[in-house]
Image (cartoon, grey):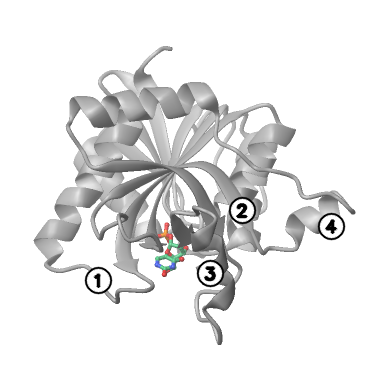
């Protein structure tokens, strides 16, 4: 047992999917995994382990923001020996051609979080995805003919902003979308020599105001993202 995860050693698979929302973890366990068993309910942050196409996979809610995901990922890496972590989240598009319901794969994660400035004083560490995992996920997305963008994203410490100017500036430099966890996931994976990738579904657009339309469309895109994450998880390079 770790402080925030009530699991025994061996309860959690080496490969894990990480949605921010714990109810999304439950949805994935119920709809994509076989023989799923709940191993964590501490703080309502559900974690499940089951199998996908015969391979053991876990899914764990992380909460929102760098501090919250950092707690779960630290414990998963240090106490449970997790080796491959795939975030399955939502994001806000900031490029014209990044549309609601597109899938974004975060090759790298720019951040305004101070966490890495505390860790590397005087440096701007560049948190990035595992190349092999990214290749596998991209391949799975192309086989399913999905609309996917791959590139730099922003991991932001704030959801609500007084000014959009910093986000506009990042968009000028090609940043695709905004979310709140990936830089921490990538930095911790680097520290503990694990593979990590963030796959995100665009739920809204920060400049056009476009948002999700029907719940059914939202669910379809979400299912596509989970399928890609699971296929990437079980493929070998
Ligand atoms: O849908 P999730 O995975 O929670 O991700 C996004 O949604 C939350 C904000 O609504 C933040 O956690 C952001 O990163
Ligand atoms: O962090 C997030 C997630 C979705 N949409 C946003 O605008 N921000």
Q: Quadrant of ligand 2?
A: bottom left
Mark 4 secondary-structure assignment: helix
Residue 162: quarter of image: bottom right
Numbered circle sitting on residue 211: 1
Determine if the C-beta at disc 2 is less than 8 A from ligand 2.
no
Residue 66: quarter of image: bottom right
Look at mark 4 in the image and give the residue it sits on. Answer: 118
Q: Is residue 110 visible?
A: yes
Look at mark 3 in the image and give the residue it sits on. Answer: 167
**CA separation in Å, label 1 and label 4:** 35 Å
Mark 2 Cα-neighbour bin, 10 Å: few <14, some 14–19, many ≥20:
many
Q: Is residue 100 left or right of residue 40?
A: left
Q: Is residue 58 above or below residue 24?
A: above
Mark 3 Cα-neighbour bin, 10 Å: few <14, some 14–19, many ≥20:
some
Q: Are marks 2 and 4 in contact (CB under 8 Å)?
A: no
Q: Is residue 84 above or below residue 108?
A: above
Determine if the C-beta at disc 4 is less than 8 A from ligand 1.
no
**CA separation in Å, label 2 and label 4:** 15 Å
Picture coordinates of residue 121, whole percent (x, y): 89, 53
Mark 4 Cα-neighbour bin, 10 Å: few <14, some 14–19, many ≥20:
few
**CA separation in Å, label 3 and label 1:** 18 Å
- In terms of depth relative to the viewer, which is nearer, 87 or 28? 87
Residue shown at 34% from the left, 29% from the top: 138
Look at mark 2 in the image and give the residue it sits on. Answer: 110
Which is closer to the viewer, label 1 or label 4?
1
């Amino acid at each position: 047992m770790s402080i925030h995860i009530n699991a025994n050693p061996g309860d959690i698979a080496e490969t894990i999917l990480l949605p921010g929302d714990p109810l999304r973890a439950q949805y994935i366990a119920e709809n994509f995994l076989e023989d799923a068993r709940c191993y964590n309910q501490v703080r309502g942050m559900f974690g499940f382990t089951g199998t996908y196409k015969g391979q053991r996979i876990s899914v764990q809610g992380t909460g929102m923001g760098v501090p919250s995901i950092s707690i779960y990922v630290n414990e998963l890496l240090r106490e449970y020996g997790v080796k491959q972590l795939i975030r399955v989240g939502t994001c806000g598009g900031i490029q014209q051609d990044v549309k609601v319901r597109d899938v974004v794969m975060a090759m790298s994660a720019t951040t305004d979080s101070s966490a890495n400035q505390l860790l590397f004083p005087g440096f701007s560490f560049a948190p990035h995805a595992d190349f092999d995992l990214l290749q596998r996920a991209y391949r799975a997305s192309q086989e399913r003919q999905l609309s996917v963008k791959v590139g730099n994203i922003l991991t932001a410490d704030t959801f609500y902003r007084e000014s959009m100017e910093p986000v506009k500036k990042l968009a000028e430099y090609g940043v695709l979308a905004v979310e709140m966890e990936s830089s921490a996931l990538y930095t911790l994976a680097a520290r503990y020599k694990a593979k990590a990738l963030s796959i995100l579904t665009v739920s809204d657009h920060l400049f056009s105001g476009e948002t999700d339309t029907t719940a059914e469309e939202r669910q379809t895109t979400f299912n596509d993202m989970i399928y890609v994450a699971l296929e990437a998880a079980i493929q070998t390079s």
